[in-house]
Image: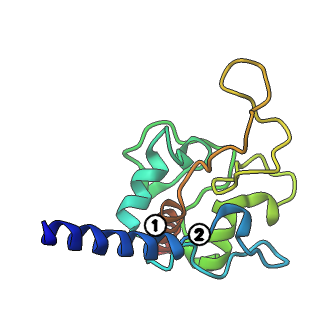
Amino acid sequence: MKTTVALASVIGIVASAALADTTIPDDVSFTEYGEVEASLTGTAGDPVRGAEIMTTRSKGNCVACHAVTALADAPFHGEVGPSLDGVGGYRSEAELRGIVANAKKMFDGTVMPAFYKTSGFIRPGDGYTGKAAPNDLPPILSAQEVEDVVAFLMTLQDS
């Protein structure tokens, strides 16, 4: 019994520490140019997980709008956004984090969705009801998923 209580306490402390290192979407600090210099989680991103997120339709689905040669096995690459080939060579980690979190901070008028935003939308709907959403919307990606996508994008260097 004592072991169970001690283990639960340790898990609670670790979970609290993990949550404390996650930036809340409305508290993300963007620079004047739209970069997010600080990690959203304090934990390095996993580029393998980032590649999965970029090709998962219910998550990032980045390939729906961007061509990415490194993800050629994923079907239906789009041409709405620029090719992401080599993006890690000409964009900084802070720039990429800002673009993924909320591209509109860097590119006013872009159609790219804000993947880490929960409020300030002008047209969010409540499912398919045609009514406005009753509360703030959850972010499309978690803070760690943003870091994972950024880690993958940083691997895309010109050869």
Q: Residue at x 59, y 49 (%)?
A: 66
Mark 2: which amino acid?
Val
Callout 2: helix, strand or loop?
Answer: helix
Q: Where is residue 71 in the image (x, y as percent from the top left)?
A: 42, 52
Specify whether 52 is left or right of 61.
left
Instruction: Please state, as top left, top right, bottom left or bottom right, where the N terminus lies in the image.
Output: bottom left
* Secondary structure state at the residue bearing disc 1: helix
Q: Name the residue under label 2.
A: 87
The residue closer to the viewer here, 4 or 159, is 4
Residue 2 located left or right of residue 158:
left
Relative depth, front residue between 144 and 22 = 22
Q: Nearer the N terminus, badge 1 or badge 2?
A: 2
Please state the total of marks drawn on the protein image: 2
At 59% across and 48% down in the image, what residue appears?
140
| Residue 43 numbered mark, or none | none
Q: Nearer the viewer, residue 141 or 87?
A: 141
Q: To which residue does mark 1 refer?
A: 152
Label 2 CA crowd tier, 10 Å (few <14, some 14–19, many 20+): some
Q: Name the residue rendered at 29%, 75% in the picture.
A: 10
Residue 89 place in picture, x, y as percent: 57, 78
Q: Give, as a three-letter code, the residue at label 1.
A: Phe
Position of residue 103 measured from the top left corner of the image (x, y, whole percent): 74, 59
| Position above or below: 157 against 126 | below
